[in-house]
Amino acid sequence: MRARVGWGRLLWLAWTLALLAGAGAASAHKASDAYLSLDVTGAQVRGQLDVALRDIDVAIGLDGGEAGGDGQITWGELRQRRDALAGWALRNLSLTRGTTSAEPCRLAVGALQVDQHTDGTYAVLPLTGSCPQASGPLRVGYRLLFEQDAMHRGLVRLTLDGTTQALVFSPERPEQRIDAAQASRWTTLGQYIVEGMWHIWLGYDHALFLVALLLPAVLVREGKAWRGVAGLGGASGGVLAVITAFTAAHALSLSLATFGWISLPSRLVESAIALTVVLAAANNLYPIVRERRWLAAFGFGLIHGFGFASVLAGLGLSREALALALVGFNIGVELGQIALVALFLPLAFRIRDTTFYRRGVLVGGSLLTLALALVWLVERVFDLRLITP
């Protein structure tokens, strides 16, 4: 039995350190997304690519032109790099219509523009082009920023001969084949289920918030001390209430924000998310909310839902396509949470009565989470870079 508990401790230690190390390297700000809309009718292509200035600066460099690297990207600096920006975009975007041997479509970038999204200023590149073939499936290649940021996502709204789909491009899925004759709603739904799962696993602030809520799930507070719960069933009930409340709340606020009924600045939302992590970790160290923790999970979940909305808000989808993406994303977030719980709960229950868990995991893990979240909070409130690249 001692050997088994020892293995449990090692597994827990490795898992906790890996999660915290990954979180420390992760960006404290909104994940990198670019928005691509394409309308392909026959051989003609029209579209628009929106890329955040901060991401372009990482990819090809913007700051340093007129103002000499002062941390502020000006219109003059962006305009000076217009040709480099257009070349970079065209090298990393590809369209091919028809058979596998067909030549790629010829694309051109129009007059450079800028636009404001919830998380900052984006460069807008109008696209036009034509394809050698006017019928058949379309192969879309998207490789922007994947070398610089493995968490980057290309969010694409594609209308092919009148049929619209929402697609997600990632380093694991940089090319997709779309056939208007075989277009299915399940494509959008399925891709956003996967994206919702990755959003939980790669969104370290969301993951750490859930972990902070789950750490006391296998313990019962008695005065100033903790003791392990008697059975896994009791812990599971509390976890189920917390996860259900969080899911319901973020689904509500995500829907309100995605459909444009409520709009909040990204910086405010991201700062509030960091604050929820601070409060959840602090509550483990100095418990204020002991009963009905699901109510706190619901309130905090509303805030996290507005953070999730940034993934969908800029796509400009039709109501039907947006609803499918929204449902798929919510399902994916829930599945991602279930996976975290399935990993966490059995291991935590196994070592709940050990000093290692009560002091090392609960107290130590909460202290580390609290410290990291405080740094995130300062970064987001004051728009600084302290530990993030």
Image (tube, grey):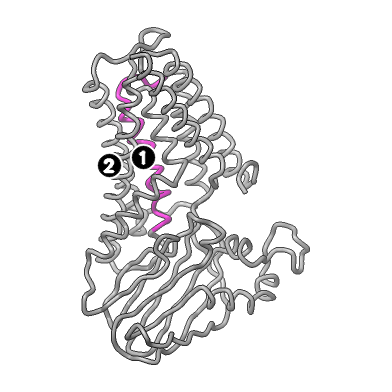
Q: Residue at x 21, y 75 (%)?
A: 182
Does the CB distance between marks 1 and 2 fall below 8 Å?
A: yes
Rendered-image quadrant of the N terminus: top left
Over which residues does the magenta segment extend?
287-311
Disc 2 secondary structure class: helix
Mark earlier in primary sequence (1, 2): 2
Rendered view: 353 above or below 371: above
Q: Of residues 114 and 239, which is closer to you in this image?
A: 239
Rendered view: 175 above or below 191: below
Q: Residue at x 51, y 35 (%)?
A: 20
Q: Of residues 304 and 368, which is closer to you in this image?
A: 368
Residue beneath disc 2:
248
Q: Position of residue 122 (x, y in %)?
A: 55, 66
Q: Of residues 102 and 37, which is closer to you in this image?
A: 102
- 296 is within the stretch colored magenta: yes
Among the 4 quarters of the image, the one containing residue 250: top left
Main SS type for the magenta part?
A: helix
Residue beneath disc 1:
301
